[in-house]
């Protein structure tokens, strides 16, 4: 029960159609730990991150479950209180640095805004903090960069700024949603190293969303494997790479070449493995529908 | 350097536009039937009288000759003499321009305020009944033209509840201590709010009639643009920082959503200025548009030309202001 973030049996559907996007997801995240959230594109990784941060699209509705942040259920909290709690204790490192900064605002205010507007810091304190953070993410001339507009900076620079902004309020939880996917390959490694470095220094718990097991192995202590909105396995990193429990995890691991045969090419997940998972999901859905219809 | 070139280019295109407008109007008013001279003379005037007057106003020459003569005057600031009012066109037009400018700008302010409020309300409560109501209001606003709004307003606030003045620009019994014809502006500067109130009571109905269709267009376009912007990544990121819906709309979305609507609003504003012709007539407002109708009725060729040139200049000025505002609001352009 020492988990800082605990997602319990979280199910979400598309409003109107009732199509299930998250299927009884349970994930526990220790304070200061990094948990990888792995799965193919469309598996619902971002949906989980959005549910935690309270930014689900309006078309998506949570129908059951709990999201406990330090023991408090976010889903059973007045929206205003939840919003402020999340703003004060959690943060997002977004996927695409090109679209995640407001083109009309200078960079500085996009780092200090939360401190000044939500947490009530003085402008001078917030600016000093922003400068220190830009230093931490290895940006030269922080003062000049803070006065720039996003379009004047490269993608890598912008992602560094977004990382600085995420750590601004010394959050206890960060959701990083594929934070390197949109970057050049050469920049990806630097940014990944930077996130690991910042996380270690600040001791922030992190939910690290990725479709890449290679990335997970570099930064996470444990991971959850997601398929079609269902967590098929949650395990410590070490155990997972030694002996993945679920056939889908095994297939995923096998499909990531460098961990088995570095010369091999990316193999698709085999048909019979997919059939197994699909069958599990169908059974799960049947049970869920019965439970919904029953009482 | 680049800036200078842009300005020169702008001036050149403006000159060409104005020249084109002048040429077209010059030819058209001379080709359509109607004789300005006949309207000036008593019915028993002889052929000789007519011919003499025609020669006096230079109307016996070919159209191209007349145009060259007129243009020669214009470059020296002489726009000719009004046939019906027998005073210099420049003086007449510039005397009336402030009234029309004040009316148009008041209408624009009303339209932006009303349309902006509609867009913000519809965005804040999107997907709810409020948005549906905003959509209906915008639909009605757009489908009823300004002069019909004018008639409706006359019915409401002129006849049923006579709260405002139906006609004129200012009550004739008022003593105006003004040195320009920008009455509204000057009354504010001189702190003569009694006169301001009287002017506004006259301008209320015509400006609202002009403003409503534009307000509806602004409301619709801006709401659409806001809703699209609200789905963008930086807006979502701002939500995770703890901002509430209203602050997210105003801080993150509004400024970016205004940009794509600005150009269209500029175009629509030139339509609004065009609309003053009918609306000023309807409310007997002593502006340029009202004068334009008299000029056409009297076939007052020099006056028509002068008014058209001023309207054309006004349109290009509006476009210039729109472009400058766009650049000022868009950091990408500001630094380019
Ligand atoms: N606004 C939305 N309305 C309905 N379904 C959505 C919406 N956004 C995403 N989805 C669906 O939810 C599923 C999970 O999406 P997502 O969490 O973004 O996947 P990923 O694992 O790639 O991050 C996908 O099947 C996607 O089609
Ligand atoms: Mg995703």
Image (cartoon, coloured by chain):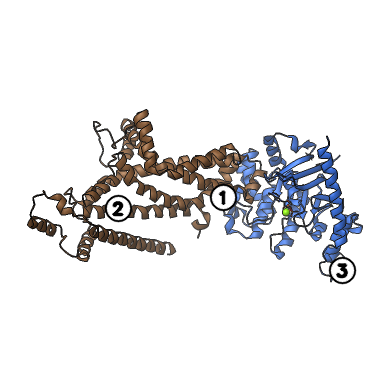
Chain colours: A blue, B brown
The residue closer to the viewer here, B305 or A161, is B305
Which mark lies nearer to you, 3 or 2?
A: 2
Cα separation between marks 3 and 2: 79 Å
Q: What element does badge 3 sit on?
A: loop
Identify the mark nearer the N-term, 3 or 1.
Answer: 1
Q: Position of residue B169 (x, y in %)?
A: 29, 37
| Discs 2 and 1 carry the same chain letter | no
- For the point 53% across and 48% down, the residue is B255
User: What kind of element bears circle 2?
Assistant: helix
**Observer able to see residue B314:** yes
Q: Mark 3 = which residue? A: A261
Quadrant (top left, top right, bottom left, bottom right) of the N terminus of chain B:
bottom left
- The residue tagged 1 is A105
Callouts 3 and 1 in the same chain: yes
Q: Chain of mark 3?
A: A
Instruction: Assess disc 1: are there few (<14), some (14-19) or many (≥20) residues with their C-alpha within 10 Å of its C-alpha.
Output: some
Q: Secondary structure at mark 1?
A: loop
**Image vertical order of residue A241 relative to residue B122, above or below:** below
Above-or-below relation of A137 to A113: below
- Whether pointer 3 and pointer 2 mark residues with C-beta atoms closer than 8 Å, the reply is no
| Residue drawn at (32%, 52%) of the image | B311
The percent coordinates of residue B237 (x first, y second) are 65, 48
Instruction: Write down the quadrant of residue A10 in the picture.
Output: top right
Query: Disc 3 to disc 1, how far (Cα)?
Result: 48 Å
Q: In the rendering, which numbered label is found on residue B310?
A: 2
Query: Is residue A35 or residue A254 the one in the foreground?
Result: A254
Residue at left 46%, top 52%?
B264
């Amino acid at each position: 029960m020492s988990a800082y973030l605990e997602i319990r049996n979280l199910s979400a559907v598309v409003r109107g159609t009732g199509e299930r996007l998250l299927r009884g997801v349970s994930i526990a995240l220790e304070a200061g730990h990094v948990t990888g959230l792995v799965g193919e594109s469309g598996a619902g990784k971002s949906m989980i991150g959005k549910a935690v941060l309270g930014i689900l699209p309006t078309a998506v509705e949570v129908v059951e479950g709990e999201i406990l942040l330090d023991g408090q259920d976010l889903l059973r909290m007045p929206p205003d209180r939840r919003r402020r709690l999340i703003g004060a204790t959690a943060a997002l490192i977004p996927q695409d640095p090109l679209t995640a900064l407001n083109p009309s605002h200078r960079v500085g205010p996009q780092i200090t805004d939360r401190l000044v507007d939500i947490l009530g810091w003085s402008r001078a304190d917030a600016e000093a903090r922003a400068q220190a953070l830009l230093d931490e993410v290895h940006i030269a001339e922080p003062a000049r960069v803070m006065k720039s507009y996003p379009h004047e900076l490269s993608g890598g620079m912008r992602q560094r700024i977004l990382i600085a902004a995420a750590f601004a309020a010394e959050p206890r939880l960060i959701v990083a949603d594929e934070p390197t996917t949109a970057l050049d390959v050469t920049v990806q490694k630097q940014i990944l190293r930077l996130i690991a470095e910042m996380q270690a220094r600040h001791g922030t718990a992190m939910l690290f969303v990725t479709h890449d097991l290679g990335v997970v192995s570099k930064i996470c202590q444990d991971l959850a494997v997601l398929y079609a909105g269902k967590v098929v396995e949650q395990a410590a990193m070490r155990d997972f790479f030694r002996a993945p429990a679920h056939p889908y995890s095994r297939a995923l691991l096998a499909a990531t070449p460098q961990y088995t045969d570095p010369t091999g090419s990316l193999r698709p997940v085999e048909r019979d493995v997919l059939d197994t998972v699909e069958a599990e999901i169908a059974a799960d859905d049947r049970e869920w529908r019965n439970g919904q219809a029953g009482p | 350097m680049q800036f200078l070139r842009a300005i020169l280019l702008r001036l050149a295109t403006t000159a060409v536009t104005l020249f084109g407008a002048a040429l077209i109007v010059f030819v058209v008013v001379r080709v359509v039937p109607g004789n300005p001279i006949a309207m000036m003379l008593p019915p028993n005037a002889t052929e000789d009288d007519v011919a003499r007057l025609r020669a006096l106003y230079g109307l016996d020459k070919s159209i191209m000759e007349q145009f060259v003569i007129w243009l020669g005057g214009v470059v020296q600031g002489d726009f000719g003499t009004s046939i019906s009012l027998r005073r210099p066109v420049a003086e007449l037009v510039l005397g009336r321009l402030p009234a029309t400018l004040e009316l148009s700008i008041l209408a624009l302010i009303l339209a932006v305020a009303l349309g902006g409020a509609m867009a913000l309300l519809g965005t804040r409560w999107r997907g709810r009944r409020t948005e549906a109501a905003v959509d209906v209001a915008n639909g009605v606003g757009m489908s009823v033209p300004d002069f019909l709004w004018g008639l409706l307003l006359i019915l409401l606030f002129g006849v049923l509840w006579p709260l405002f003045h139906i006609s004129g620009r200012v009550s004739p019994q008022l003593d105006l201590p003004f040195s320009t014809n920008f009455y509204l502006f000057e009354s504010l500067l001189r702190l003569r709010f009694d006169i301001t109130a009287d002017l506004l009571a006259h301008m209320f109905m015509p400006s609202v009639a002009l403003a409503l269709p534009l307000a509806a267009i602004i409301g619709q376009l801006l709401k659409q643009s806001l809703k699209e912007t609200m789905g963008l990544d930086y807006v979502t990121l701002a939500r995770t920082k703890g901002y509430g819906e209203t602050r997210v709309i105003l801080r993150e979305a509004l400024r970016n959503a205004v940009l794509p609507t600005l150009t269209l609003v500029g175009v629509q504003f030139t339509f609004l200025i065009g609309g003053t012709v009918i609306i000023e007539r309807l409310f007997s407002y002593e502006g340029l548009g009202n004068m334009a109708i008299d000029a056409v009725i009297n076939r007052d060729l020099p006056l028509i030309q002068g008014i058209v040139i001023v309207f054309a200049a006004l349109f290009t000025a509006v476009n210039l202001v729109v472009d400058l505002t766009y650049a000022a609001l868009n950091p990408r352009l500001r630094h380019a």
